[in-house]
Image (tube, rainbow, N blue to C red):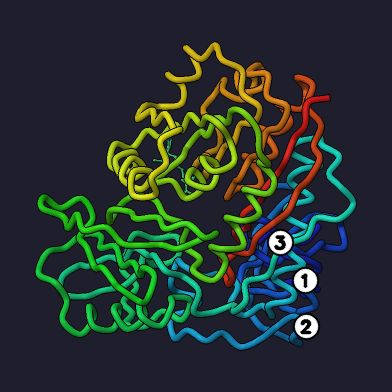
């Protein structure tokens, strides 16, 4: 074992779920090293840590591995937004496949299919159509890595060009009000810049088009953020849900999947806890002339507590934290023949799936979507069928 704070030469083997490179000391201890890429040889300063795991920081990059590339962003490394701009895109995708598989097997104790595809983003930069920036004391930017301090920037290369320009304009003439601002681009390049949570916040909706549907959402309401994969994601979720008599959709948002479900099922119950999102959903259904959806603007916990009806299919798209405590076993008692679970966090997905599988469902299909290139995040779609 190496003494603490000593420098050690390591070879980076892989990328971990949190984004750090992973290496193994000769004694077997695993060391996590930020801003490294598979194949790199690095001199690392080891921070005080445990006997099995430690963290380190790069003192010297001795030799770049084949997965290393040049970051595009001037504030990469200090900004808290991206962790992988130094990793070639193919290597990012390979790491996401491994992260997804590892979460399902190690955290969930599941046996995923032999192949877990991760659908690549058509462009690893210029994809993001929604972001939040911080305005503080006349400066604009993101939070710094592992800090609340501002990392000022006027450019962000993961944003779609219209939003990148909007950020530059905001940084050139910063608003007087400090706080968080949402920058969002709609279909056709329309942009809204809105102060988050401000009284009198703009309520003009932005249009998103995906899977042949038109979804409008009020600024501040959740929206899928990868403009280049909206269509692919919508079609995949709808394909997995199939068609039938009744569908229950939990965490429906403004209706990104609901409109398509309404065309494929005789009746749909859509549950969304945010009142503004639920109002957008009602608006979107009316605009599409769809009248077979019962919108429940309530927490899913409350709706499921009282739900006695069986549904053919249940679609779940919870936030990063996954299903609220106790909900996974409850979902499994709804009698659905198919459960379709969309998740932005492999760890909470694996935790919830393992609870559901124990009640008599089989994991049939898993697929990833690279909605967040240059970050370790991966979206996953899992389908379970009743055994
Ligand atoms: C990841 S978003 C998905 C939204 C939608 N499916 C989409 O693709 O746009 C999760 C949604 O769940 C809602 N939500 C979070 N916790 C909830 C709860 N306990 N009950 C009901 N809705 C909740 C949020 O307001 C948000 O709209």
The residue under label 3 is 96
Q: Are marks 1 and 2 in contact (CB under 8 Å)?
A: yes
How far from the left and from the top, in percent, is residue 110? 82, 37
Question: Could you tell me which secondary element the residue under label 1 belongs to?
Answer: loop
The residue under label 2 is 65
- Give whichever of 23, 2 is nearer the camera: 23
Q: Earlier in the sequence, mark 3 or mark 2?
A: 2
Q: Are marks 3 and 2 in contact (CB under 8 Å)?
A: no
Measure the C-alpha gap from mark 3 to mark 2: 18 Å
Depicted 133 relative to depicted 252: above or below: below
User: Where on the picture, by quarter, is residue 169?
Assistant: bottom left
Q: What residue do we see at 45% from left, 33% from top?
A: 292
Measure the C-alpha gap from mark 1 to mark 2: 8 Å
Q: Earlier in the sequence, mark 1 or mark 3?
A: 1
Q: Nearer the viewer, mark 1 or mark 3?
A: 3
Residue extending furthest toward the front: 289
Question: Could you tell me which secondary element the residue under label 2 belongs to?
Answer: loop
How far from the left and from the top, in percent, is residue 98? 78, 58
The residue under label 1 is 12
């Amino acid at each position: 074992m190496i003494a603490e704070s000593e420098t050690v030469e390591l070879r980076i083997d892989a990328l971990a779920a949190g984004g750090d490179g992973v290496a193994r000391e000769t004694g077997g201890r695993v060391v996590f090293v930020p801003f490294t890429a598979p194949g790199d040889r690095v001199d690392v300063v080891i921070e005080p840590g445990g006997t099995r795991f430690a963290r380190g920081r790069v003192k010297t990059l001795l030799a770049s591995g084949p997965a290393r590339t040049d970051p595009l962003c001037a504030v990469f490394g200090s900004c808290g937004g991206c962790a992988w701009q130094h990793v070639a895109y193919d290597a990012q995708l390979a790491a996401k496949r491994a992260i997804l598989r590892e979460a399902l097997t190690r955290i969930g104790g599941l046996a995923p299919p032999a192949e877990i595809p991760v659908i690549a983003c058509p462009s690893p930069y210029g994809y993001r159509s929604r972001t939040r920036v911080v305005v503080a004391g006349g400066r604009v930017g993101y939070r710094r890595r592992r800090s609340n301090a501002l990392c000022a920037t006027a450019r962000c290369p993961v944003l779609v060009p219209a939003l990148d320009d909007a950020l530059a304009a905001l940084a050139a003439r910063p608003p007087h009000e400090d706080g968080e601002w949402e920058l969002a681009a709609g279909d056709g390049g329309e942009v809204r810049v809105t102060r988050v949570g401000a009284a009198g916040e703009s309520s003009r909706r932005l249009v998103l088009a995906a899977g042949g549907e038109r979804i409008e959402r009020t600024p501040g309401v959740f929206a899928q953020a990868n403009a280049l994969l909206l269509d692919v994601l919508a079609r995949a979720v709808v394909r997995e849900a199939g068609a039938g008599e009744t569908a229950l959709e939990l965490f429906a948002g403004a209706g990104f999947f609901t409109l398509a479900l309404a065309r494929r099922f005789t009746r749909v119950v859509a549950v969304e806890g945010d009142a503004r999102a639920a109002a957008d959903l009602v608006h979107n259904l009316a605009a599409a002339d769809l009248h077979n959806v019962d919108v429940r603007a309530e927490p899913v916990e409350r709706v499921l507590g009282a739900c006695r009806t069986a549904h053919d299919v249940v679609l779940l798209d919870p936030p990063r934290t996954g299903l609220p405590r106790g909900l996974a076993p409850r979902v499994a008692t709804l009698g659905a023949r198919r459960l379709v679970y969309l998740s932005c966090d492999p760890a909470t997905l694996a935790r919830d799936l393992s609870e559901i599988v124990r009640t008599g469902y089989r994991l049939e299909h898993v697929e990833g979507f690279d909605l967040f290139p240059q970050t370790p995040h991966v979206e996953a779609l899992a389908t379970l069928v009743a055994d």
